[in-house]
Amino acid sequence: MTDGLPTDYVTYEEFGRRFFEIAVTEDRVGGAIAAIAGDAFEIGPIAQGPGKIAKVTAKVQILEPRVRRHVGDAITFAIRIPLEIDMVVDLRIDKPKFMVFGEISLRATAKAAEPLLLILDVEKPRPSDIAIHVTSKSLRAEVVRIVGGVDAEIRRFIAAHVAGEIDSPESVQAKIIDVAEQVAESWGT
């Protein structure tokens, strides 16, 4: 350091890359994903099974996302969002209950855009990105679940719900950081 100024300068490109690596952390991405995913939602009733006689309803609780960052040419994130689901299948004569544990797997990439934006580009999940484990207390409930294709329908519905949340106006705002605006605010200009 000479006269209080550093002497080990970097290029603008190196500065920008370092800025991205410091600004886009697992904790910050986890916070943005939590804002996008929300806390809970309900499914149904969805008609299932032969003759669509069964009506499936579920309360989905969204837990804290787990985020793993990979720094390469691009900064990418593997995101896992745990779920707890209370599900009821109304058969008109019986209402078996199920406890479902699941997880949504998402992928995201940190991107730069004009004029000076930092964007978290989150891919929409497919049903295959939803893993669930269903437990029930009766053989009848298990048969209904399997014959009715309930697991696949839950995965499809959760994937569609999360895709809709990713596209919501609030989520779009949560995925964009206007760096120029943040710098102006911090310098009071």
Image (cartoon, rainbow, N blue to C red):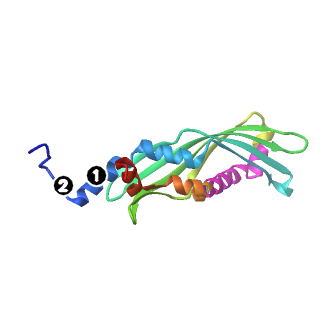
Q: Is residue 148 a member of the stretch shown in magenta?
A: yes
- Say which amino acid is labelled 2: Val
Residue 171 to residue 67: above or below? below
Res 76 label? none
- Badge 1: how crowded within 10 Å, few (<14), some, or many (20+)? few
Front in this rendered view, residue 89 or 83: 83
Residue furthest to the bottom in view is 114
Farthest-out residue, front: 189
Mark 2 and mark 1 residues within 8 Å of each other at the beta carbon: yes
> In the image, which residues are magenta?
143-164
Callout 1 secondary element: helix
Q: Looking at the image, which residue is at 16% across and 53% down?
A: 9
Whichever of callouts 2 and 1 sits on the residue coming sooner in the sequence is 2
Residue matched to label 2: 10
91 sits left or right of 17 in the view? right
Measuring from the top left, give residue 116's x and y in whole percent.
38, 61
Per the picture, the main secondary structure of the magenta-coloured stretch is helix
Helix, strand or loop for disc 2: loop
Above or below: residue 136 compared with residue 42: above
How crowded pointer 2 is (Cα within 10 Å; few <14, some 14-19, many 20+) is rated as few
